[in-house]
Image: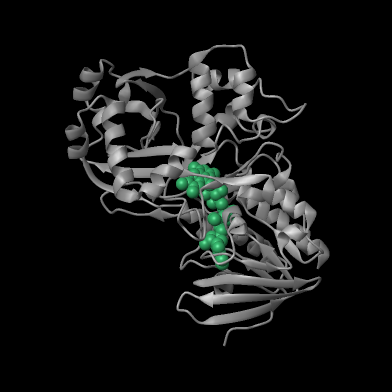
């Protein structure tokens, strides 16, 4: 018989909710984690293909920068994080050339973003700048759209200035990959608390007053249930908090979150960015072959890590370097990613195959003949994500800090969107937010 009364309910078993749970468990607090999906990890979603030596990462894939919270987990769990020290290339109409100036070009633009004065959009910032370094501006636009998954017309200049790029810090420019698959991070954080996680449990409502919360749930099987708690940690994606009542996955708060003026400002100050990511399994890692090197007139493509281009559909590609595998990932962030996702998986794959041909100077027939399998997850239409990850809108650079503030010692908030240290949209930011929310709650309990 499942218990119907606990001290703390944690909503969501992504790494933010799991990390909060881990800390509460350490302090012997009575809690449960309620998770809509039949798996933990949320936007970490790793699949395996037995013919490949790397995991297929449908969600998070990279360890960005120093990411101490994540490297700490990796170290405790004895997970191998490999550095991606390969070479970046750029493709212009199918002609490839090294992009060794990527970080410096990006920094030349991003270091001019203002942290003072009235906030503007990234596009307004670009238009106000008299410098006309076309290549550096292209890198910066690609970074904002593809790394931040943001719309340059809406994203806050100040938020980008306060941690939106690694600057000239080589440690923050580092990129790594969890070799055995990112889901090992979620599994490690959740070790020892498995019996407190209720999978397949969709939270539909939270009625609350100070010190007393009633949570309505629906099992994926259809049966309804409820749970009472003294406090709740809301570790749901921002997209779910934004969803209109009646939409699948929506949680109706009573009284509504937006009745609190700080929470209303937090929710208005951020939005979910969109990403379309397609993993392709190929007959061979063709870019590393001598045949392709002759054709591309460059023998050094075997260390290809990232390929950038101004392509409309899929401007960023990466290999599994340093692991040698016949895998390419096609990536698009921002407004176009939302359109591609809305077109559905078949159309998204078609667009990726055409882009593959354009980027690598292949015929469309050669490109599709090389692909033996594809993977795609539609994060836009996923009711329990409703987008890829958050970014701050003009005037909203303090929105994550506002989201992180507890309400009446009863509602606590975790999740990547509530990280106020410039790590929104990342796994390590989500872990840090869970740790912070648990600490806030422990002070109250
Ligand atoms: C395609 C993609 C690529 C990414 N790449 C990277 C990367 O390379 N590096 C990086 O650091 N970050 C990356 N990210 C971002 C990273 O995945 C997230 O920032 C992080 O995983 C968020 O963790 P979280 O716990 O805040 O949220 P989530 O992982 O989304 O967890 C929230 C949980 O709440 C559950 N939930 C939602 N609604 C309900 C409900 N009504 N009832 C019960 N449960 C509910 C969800 O199922 C989910 O499990 C990527 C994200 C995407 C989508």
Left/right of residue 373 with respect to residue 92 in the rendered view: left
- The quarter holding residue 30 reads bottom right
Nearer to me, 92 or 55: 92
Q: Position of residue 183 (x, y in %)?
A: 47, 55
Compared to 297, does 340 lie above or below?
Answer: below
Q: Position of residue 17 (x, y in %)?
A: 61, 60
Q: Residue at x 38, y 28 (%)?
A: 311
Q: Looking at the image, which residue sits at the far bottom?
A: 1
Compared to 199, does 22 lie above or below?
Answer: above
Disc tally is 0
Nearer to me, 71 or 391: 391
- Residue 314 can be seen, yes or no: yes
Q: Residue at x 61, y 35 (%)?
A: 155
Q: Residue at x 52, y 30 (%)?
A: 143
Nearer to me, 354 or 230: 354
Q: Residue at x 60, y 61 (%)?
A: 18
Nearer to me, 47 or 150: 150
Name the image quarter holding the C terminus. Answer: bottom right
Q: Position of residue 272 (x, y in %)?
A: 56, 47
- The quarter holding residue 320 reads top left
Left/right of residue 433 with respect to residue 276 in the rendered view: right
């Amino acid at each position: 018989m499942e218990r119907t009364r606990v001290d703390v309910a944690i909503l969501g078993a992504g790494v933010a909710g799991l990390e909060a749970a881990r800390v509460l468990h350490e302090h012997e607090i009575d809690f449960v984690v309620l998770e809509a999906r039949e798996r933990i990890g949320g936007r970490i979603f790793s699949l395996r293909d037995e013919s490949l030596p790397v995991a297929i990462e449908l969600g998070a894939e990279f360890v960005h920068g120093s990411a101490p919270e994540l490297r700490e987990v990796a170290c405790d769990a004895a997970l191998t994080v490999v550095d991606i020290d390969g070479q970046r290339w750029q493709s212009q109409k199918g002609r490839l050339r090294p992009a060794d100036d990527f970080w410096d070009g990006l920094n030349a633009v991003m270091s001019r973003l203002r942290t003072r004065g009235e906030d503007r959009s990234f596009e307004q910032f670009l238009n106000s700048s008299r410098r006309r370094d076309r290549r550096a501006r292209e890198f910066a636009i690609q970074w904002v759209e593809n790394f931040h998954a943001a719309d340059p017309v809406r994203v806050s200049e100040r938020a980008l200035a306060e941690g939106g790029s690694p600057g000239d810090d080589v440690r923050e420019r580092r990129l790594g990959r969890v070799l055995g698959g990112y889901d090992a991070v979620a599994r490690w954080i959740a070790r020892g608390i498995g019996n407190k996680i209720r999978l397949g449990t969709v939270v539909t409502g939270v009625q609350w007053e100070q010190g007393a919360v009633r949570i309505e749930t629906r099992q994926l099987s259809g049966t309804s249930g409820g749970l009472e708690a003294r406090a709740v940690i809301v570790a749901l994606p921002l997209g779910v908090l934004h969803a209109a009542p009646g939409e699948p996955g929506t949680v109706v708060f009573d009284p509504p979150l937006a009745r609190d003026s700080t929470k209303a400002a937090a929710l208005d100050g951020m939005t979910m960015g969109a990403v379309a990511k397609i993993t392709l399994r190929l007959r061979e890692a063709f870019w590393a072959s001598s045949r392709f090197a002759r054709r591309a007139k460059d023998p050094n493509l075997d260390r290809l890590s990232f390929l950038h281009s101004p392509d409309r559909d899929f401007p960023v590609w990466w290999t599994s370097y340093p692991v040698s595998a016949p895998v390419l990932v096609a990536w698009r962030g921002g407004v176009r990613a939302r359109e591609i996702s809305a077109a559905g998986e078949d159309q998204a794959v078609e667009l990726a195959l055409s882009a593959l041909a354009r980027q690598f100077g292949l015929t469309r027939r050669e490109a599709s003949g090389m692909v033996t399998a594809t993977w795609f997850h539609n994060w836009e239409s996923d009711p329990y994500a409703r987008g890829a990850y958050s970014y701050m809108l003009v005037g909203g650079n303090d929105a994550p800090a506002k989201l992180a503030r507890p309400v009446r010692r009863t509602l606590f908030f975790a999740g990547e969107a509530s990280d106020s240290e410039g790590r929104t949209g990342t796994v390590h930011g989500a872990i840090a937010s869970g740790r912070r929310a648990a600490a806030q709650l422990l002070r109250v309990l």
